[in-house]
Image: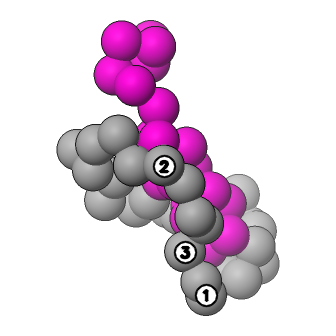
Amino acid sequence: MEAVKVKLVSTHGAGDEFTGVLAAEIAKGTRMEDALRAANHAAAVLVSTPRDTIR
């Protein structure tokens, strides 16, 4: 699966975000491919969002 192209702000927490969303999606019964897409998207949003806008 190709990475989502974003303007990088910080990679801090990207792995945790990806893993957490992946685990949550799998726990909900989401198909693996869709769970991976959701996790990939969530990590992309995190790494492209300035820290002062995350609450």
Residue type at mark 3 is: Ala
- Tag of residue 7: 2
Is residue 24 placed above or below 2 in the rendered structure?
A: above
Are the residues tagged 1 and 3 within 8 Å (C-beta)?
A: yes
* Quarter holding residue 28: bottom right
Residue type at mark 2 is: Lys
Q: Quadrant of the N terminus?
A: bottom right
Residue 14 in the image, given as x and y percentages of width and height:
34, 53
The secondary structure that dominates the magenta segment is helix
Numbered range of the magenta stretch? 35-55
Is residue 29 placed above or below 53 in the rendered structure?
A: below
Q: At 35% from the left edge and 40% from the top edge, which residue is drawn?
A: 9
- Labels 2, 3: front one: 2
Q: Secondary structure at mark 1?
A: loop
Residue 55 in the image, given as x and y percentages of width and height:
44, 12
Count residues near mark 2 (Cα–Cα under 10 Å), then give few for <14, some for 14-19, many for 20+: few
- Taking the image as shown, residue 28 lies to the left or right of residue 36, namely right
| Residue 30 part of the magenta segment | no
Q: Secondary structure at mark 3?
A: loop
Q: Secondary structure at mark 2?
A: loop
Residue type at mark 1 is: Met
Q: At 40% from the left edge and 25% from the top edge, which residue is drawn?
A: 50
Q: Which residue is mark 3?
A: 3
- Tag of residue 1: 1
